[in-house]
Image: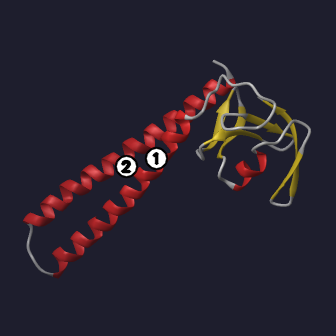
Amino acid sequence: MEIKENLYQQCVDYVNKRLQTVEEIISSNQKALQSETKSSAGDKHETGRAMLQLEMEKAGQQLQGITQMKEVLTRIDISKKSKIAHLGSVVVTDKASYFLSISSGQLIVDDKQYFSVSISSPIGRLLLGKKEDETVVFNGAKQKIKEIF
């Protein structure tokens, strides 16, 4: 499997795993809310319901983020070849290697470390549109772009 395909697949797996986790949280919170309804009334009951509501809202926001990540992944064409950094590019600098996609952190392919970064992240915005041999400054450190594929 090609590096780009492998990185892309790891991002898809990351999103699917997060989606599964959030769906499990929502499901267990819904069950808890139903059992809270059947339990005793009073302040303790109201506090429990309020906490579950907050958890549900938080899970809902996470679900929204996951949906946005899925949307970004559908826009990536890993077969697209360009020497200008774009969504789906692998950008290799003298300091690190980046996969411009979603923010899913560190990925490993063939014992090499890549950072999966969103194009709306600070480093993603810096790299977007750059060409090989150009230099970017991120967190005070210069990084020279060696390769884009």
Q: Residue at x 23, y 71 (%)?
A: 48
User: For the residue marked with disc 1, what is the amino acid?
Assistant: Ile
Count up the numbered dots: 2
From this viewpoint, which residue is outermost toward the top? 1
Q: Is residue 114 left or right of residue 94?
A: left
Question: Separation of disc 1 and disc 2 at Cα?
Answer: 9 Å
User: For the residue marked with disc 2, what is the amino acid?
Assistant: Val
What label does residue 22 carry, if any? 2
What label does residue 66 carry, if any? 1
Q: Are marks 1 and 2 in contact (CB under 8 Å)?
A: yes
How does the figure colour the protein chain or chains? secondary structure
From this viewpoint, which residue is outermost toward the bottom? 43
Q: Is residue 17 left or right of residue 109?
A: left
**Depth-wise, is mark 1 or mark 2 nearer the camera?**
1
Location of the N terminus by quadrant is top right
Q: Position of residue 53 (x, y in %)?
A: 28, 66
Mark positioned earlier in the residue sequence (1 or 2):
2
Q: Is residue 107 above or below residue 35?
A: above
Q: Is residue 127 left or right of residue 52?
A: right
Q: Residue at x 44, y 39 (%)?
A: 17
Residue closest to the eye, 109 or 89: 89
**Residue 84 position by quadrant:** top right
Q: Is residue 13 above or below residue 38?
A: above
Q: Residue at x 32, y 52 (%)?
A: 25
**Residue 77 position by quadrant:** top right
**Residue 102 position by quadrant:** top right
Location of the C terminus by quadrant is top right
Q: Is residue 108 above or below residue 128?
A: above
Q: Is residue 31 above or below residue 75?
A: below
Q: Secondary structure at mark 1?
A: helix
Q: Secondary structure at mark 2?
A: helix
